[in-house]
Amino acid sequence: MSFKVVIELRKTGRMEEALSMAKVDLEKDPKEIWNRRAIAWVYYDFLKKYAQPENYKLFKENLEKIKALELPEEEKMVFDKSAYQIGKMIFAFQKVVPVDFSKINEVFELIKCFHFTKPSDAYSYLYKAFHKGYHNWSNYLAFADWWGFENFRSEDCLPDEYIGRKKMAIVEQAYIAYSKKLLEGKPIDPFGQQREIDRDKIQEFIPHLDTIIEDHPEYQYPPYFKAKLLLALGDTENVFSAFIPFAKKKRNDFWVWELMAEIISENEELKFACYCKALSLKTPEDFLVKLRQTFASMLVDKQMYPEAKTDIKKLIATRSKNKWKLPNQVTQWTEQDWFKTAKSKSDNSVLYEKHLKKAEEILYQDIPEEVVVIEFVNTYKNILYFVKDKTKYGFFNYTGQLEKPEIGEILKVRFCGDGQEGFYKVLTAKKASENNDSPAIRGFKGRLKIIPPQNFGFADDVFIPPYTISDNNLEDNMEIEGKAILSFNKKKNEWGWKAIRLN
């Protein structure tokens, strides 16, 4: 049987002889699967031999010959082996500058009808090769749709490692790449200056993005790109909730707050606060020039000229250092009278600090605020004791949250989980008006009954501490009124009311 001889010739490297014999057999009986299979493997050998950019013409010829055989779907082995050579060639193309994407497109068109095993290591390798240059490849979305993200293996969902460094899982990379290309849109003018997004395609993709977000909460970036896609669609109702989980994880990256400002752009106050938060973070100045310019424009609009000049000078210094051209807007600012007369500062850190808390609160809007009352303040340790009701009370550190908290003040607090031995972590805390209802505070009015010799007292079932009596020169049977807080008596193991303020 000739096909066995063809195999032997291939094994010994006599490729031309193998090809000649395989051609004779194929011409005799072109429908015989063994003949088609035998010559397909010979073409594969040549494919392997010519898998370098300088031999592309010969590589392509053999790829075309494999395609022309129209092998049945079950002949997967030759296609899978070819996938590695195709991938090798595509990887090599992308090392040549500039990349010839016309050749990549040709290869893609040729392999569309190939019967690869899905999923498989070979098929994933093929994806990685074409994915490598997706940034500049206009045909990427068509390729990704053809390849099918449902064909990723479980191994593809795991982070990779390269030269001792962890790499993002190829699955996460794939969803990010697809999102970026959707956001990039298609050019609608000859020069590519104007682009248009495919709204239908975005809406079709978002449910797939939802699945990957749900199945892989460890992936950081899919929620970010879901927010970007929703924003592109103008879906402001859902974009915020989609972005928050990502923003919480990456809250120390300036660009998270830049995007947050875009999301809540209609709220000028919060937008301003987001820019303050972004600029308050430790970030190399080279990354901040555009952000500073946008923020400076807001400061100019508010006529906050010293602050505006401060940020403008910073961005000018960065652009000068890098020999980057100054935007026209910045040049125009420097020529105006207010810029010449305003006194700049060393930095705007005080301004940022003043507003950034409002931005941070955005992250926790999905966590309800709880109304509590301050029972005691330890100013040396920045600890305050609070009571919400008979089921929740304890203490927390108020550093960075409150200024000069006082006993009896009502707070709105977002707690981070449950307390441990009375200690709570808080996400946000701010003073609330006294009009906020709280079961932990009430007014009282009644006649004072002093209990000697301790000299504490009661009025309207409210405990009046000795220091309150002495400090206010109170006497027995005196009519008093004030505010009382719910308080737990550890000695008696019972709840009661304690005066915190007299009117």
Image: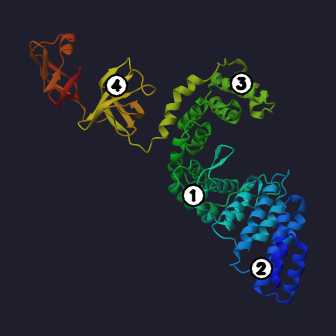
Q: Check disc 2 and give the amino acid type.
A: Arg
Query: CB of mark 4 within 8 Å of CB of mark 3?
Result: no
Q: Position of residue 468 (x, y in %)?
A: 21, 15
Residue 311 or 85: which is nearer the viewer?
85
Q: Mark 3 or mark 1, which has the lower sequence index?
A: 1
Q: Secondary structure at mark 2?
A: helix
**Residue 494 drawn above or below residue 95:** above
Distance of mark 1 from mark 2, alpha carbons?
40 Å
Q: Is residue 63 in sight in this rendering?
A: no
Query: CB of mark 4 within 8 Å of CB of mark 2?
Result: no
In the picture, measured across the screen, residue 140 lies left or right of residue 388, that is right
Residue annotated with mark 1? 209
Q: Check disc 3 and give the amino acid type.
A: Lys
**Residue 49 drawn above or below residue 28:** above
Q: Mark 3 or mark 2, which has the lower sequence index?
A: 2
Residue annotated with mark 3? 313
Residue annotated with mark 4? 384
Task: Give residue 261's quadrant in the image.
Answer: top right
Residue 440 or 68: which is nearer the viewer?
68
Density class for disc 4 (Cα within 10 Å; few <14, some 14-19, many ≥20) is many
Query: CB of mark 3 within 8 Å of CB of mark 2?
Result: no
Q: Residue at x 33, y 21 (%)?
A: 377
Q: Residue at x 54, y 47 (%)?
A: 243
Which of pointers 1 and 2 indicates the residue nearer the eye?
Answer: 2
In the picture, measured across the screen, residue 13 lies left or right of residue 269, that is right
Q: Position of residue 372 (x, y in %)?
A: 31, 33
**Tag shown at residue 37:** 2
Distance of mark 4 from mark 2, alpha carbons?
80 Å
In the picture, measured across the screen, residue 310 lies left or right of residue 7, that is left
Q: Secondary structure at mark 3?
A: helix
Q: Position of residue 421 (x, y in %)?
A: 31, 33
Residue 404 or 303: which is nearer the viewer?
404
